[in-house]
Image (cartoon, coloured by chain):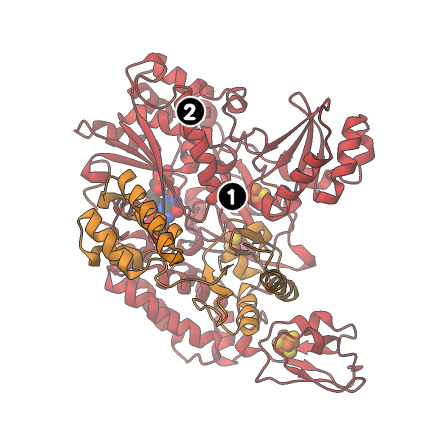
Amino acid sequence: MKIVVGQGSCGIAAGAGKTYEAIRACMKESEAFELGSTGCNGMCFLEPIVDIYEGHRLLKRLVNVDAAQAERIVSAVRENRLEDLSDLAIRAEDEQFLTQQTRIALRNCGIIDPVDIRSYQERDGYKALEKVLKTMTPEEVIEEIKVSGLAGRGGAGFPTWFKWNAARQSPGEEKYLICNADEGDPGAFMDRAVIESDPHNLIEGMMIAAYAIGASEAIVYVRAEYPLAIIHLTEAIKQAREAGYIGTNILGTDFSCEFRYMAGAGAFVCGEETALIESLEGKRGMPRLKPPFPAAAGYKMKPSNINNVETFANVAWIILNGGDKFAAMGTENSKGTKVFALTGKIRRGGLVEIPMGQTLRHVIFDIGGGIRGGKKIKAVQLGGPSGGCVPEHLLDTVIDYKALGATGAIMGSGGMVVMDEDTCMVGMARFFLDFTSKESCGKCVHCRIGTRRMLEVLNRIVEGQGQEGDIELLEELCYSIKDGALCGLGQTAPNPVLTTIRYFRDEYEAHIQEKHCPAGECRDLLMYYIDPDLCKGCTACARKCPADAIEGQVKAPHRIDPEKCIKCGTCMSNCKFGAISVR
Amino acid sequence: MSNCSCKDDRIQALDAVLEECGHDAGNLITILQNAQEIYGYLPSEIIYYVAAQTGVSPARVMGVATFYSQFRLEPVGKYLIMLCKGTACHVNGADTLEDVISNELGITNGQTTKDGLFSLKTVACLGCCSLSPVMMINDEVFGLLTSDKVISILNEFRNKAEGGKDA
Ligand SMILES: Cc1cc2nc3c(=O)[nH]c(=O)nc-3n(C[C@H](O)[C@H](O)[C@H](O)COP(=O)(O)O)c2cc1C
Ligand code: SF4
Ligand code: SF4
Ligand code: FES
Ligand code: FES
């Protein structure tokens, strides 16, 4: 038997590292079973997760396992009495989170040991690269990708074969293949999970693409905030080089290609492909004018092709299983599967990979288990700062580039943040504009100044200073920024505002006209208040208040000083008598 | 003086990085990341030094150092609190946590406490969105935070510093 602990970043944050160490400490010198680790299977809501295997067969999945359970687990495994662990076993209901998914890009995540190349090879790893190098021409590879209908998973959904073909056709000896692992959408972590949990799958997909376009070097541009992903990638590159999948005369063929990564340094705009190239060249990440497109003049002004991590993560599977099998999933214009990072007010948050064509409602309710705490869903945000929100009444929209686009949102790279009735939609729009105005590179006046102006207007609305005509002013700013911006950051920055105005205009109006936040979230419009008739003077609130804003004698009604109160809500959740309310 | 030799070590480490990066301004970001790792921030003399060593103007190096949020031109406290203000954390109450931390430590985003113990920096997303709201102190991630929990974590770090157990 083998005990396997999931140790992705989220898992470690939930304590998986301690669980692993504790299990190891409980093991004796010679045990009949092994201890191993894996990345994450995307069930973030159950971390730390411990799987018990017999060979490749999963015998038991234990969830929310803290270090204190180590002793029990080790003895149960040692004595082959797994039934003793049934209180830790995953509940049938939660299992549905995985059983309802179809995993291609994530097929190995949480199953293999990410930093052991043999573990990847056992699951057909590097067979696709071998097949490509030994039996296919670059044109045949591109044709297979064309048949698959694979489109870019970084957001825009551009056909992958077309970009590969353009880079292949582009004249020049020196070409580059680049992976966009900048994953800038705050609230998304699909790419991190792939790199951390299955780095060889990324490397293999990239080497196949490098062969297809004729690149001599492949480079991953990875977000700096992902230290574990960088460690795993570094190790995987080393192993792949030793095994002969990277370097000169790969697998004895005349194809040679180097491979390296570069860590970004924190700038959302660097996710835009030309800004990413500038950054790779050691410069400020300012987008370039297109054309020339990267396929003609990219990194070092040489023909280059850039794809997203998830795009590459599908490639080896497509080569081995056939483009037609991939194309058999999905809808007319969106093929294959898509990975989403499901977060927000959701019960079961984590990574979801499903065939295109399923509804948002299915993902949120059947897979994600609906909203936490019995609240009602209000909307879901797709595509982060470049995307928009889809309101509850449109949740039957299917996951498809066109259908989602029609709602005013976008497919995006996979961020799916669920919001409930307590989320203020004006506050959401303000949040995104705060983000984009800070992240604008400053090259275009409309984007640099326009996003600032929009933020100012949104700020005054949530602070209760909104004026008649502010909604119209926002709309006007939106359209002029869209027209005047050079890159996708500016062109899409208005989307969160436009969609919230479209679906939640009444919330904007309530803030402006009645100085009221219907969701009860905008803190400038809130007042915490202790009802003197209900307050027993237990002092529980005053002791917990981080701002020392509550005064009052023991056993006498307490009072909140609105000047000092930072509106954190701690007092309300600590009052046993329900004396504290928000108005 | 003891810090002389330590300064030497640091310059040597930086020289090794420059060597590995071929003194190439195309690797400026990687060089600055390493320099920051070595010094804890980017002192202005290092900006000049890197410029001279890579054959570009100090303005170009400064331009890069100010463009990317990872780079710091000021030293940070012993414990760097990175509070996530990404979408998932926002939806789950990160703004309140920022107020709680600011209030508790008497600093705002980008500042360091007078005793040099804590610095606060808000970041876009730490990639642990399912545990939101999330913060990271040095290399440790803390998830599913509440106001109470944040304060007790800060107190733990305070005690740790006082106990001198931490290197
Ligand atoms: C502001 C901005 C941010 C972007 N961020 C990312 C990102 O984080 N990851 C990504 O893969 N693509 C991102 N893109 C899209 C890329 O420019 C590019 O289209 C993509 O990497 C191409 O890969 P694909 O065809 O495989 O999707 C971003 C675009 C813009 C305008
Ligand atoms: S649209 Fe904004 S981010 Fe894009 S190039 Fe212009 S100023 Fe920079
Ligand atoms: S909301 Fe927070 S700051 Fe205000 S009185 Fe209650 S505990 Fe104190
Ligand atoms: S547990 Fe791995 S992505 Fe969350
Ligand atoms: S939004 Fe906070 S960790 Fe991603």
Q: Few, some or many C-alpha atoms within 10 Å of disc 1 (few <14, some 14-19, many ≥20)? A: many
| Residue at (54% x, 37% y) in the render | A354
Depth order, front residue of A393/A20: A20
Q: Chain of mark 2?
A: A
Vertical comparison of B4 with A357: above or below: below
- Tell me the orange chain: B
User: Which residue was labeled with disc 1?
Assistant: A340
**Colour for chain A in the figure:** red
Name the image quarter holding the N terminus of chain B. bottom left
Q: Residue at x 37, y 18 (%)?
A: A132
Can you give x and y, in whole percent of width and height, for residue A440 in the image? 32, 59
Residue at image x 27%, y 59%? Answer: B45
Left-right relation of A225 to A66: left
Residue A160 location, quadrant: top left
Residue that label 2 marks: A240
Residue B32 x/y as whole percent:
32, 50
Q: Position of residue B120 (x, y in %)?
A: 48, 64
- Give me the C-alpha separation between circle 2 and circle 1: 28 Å
Left or right, residue B43 beside residue B163: left
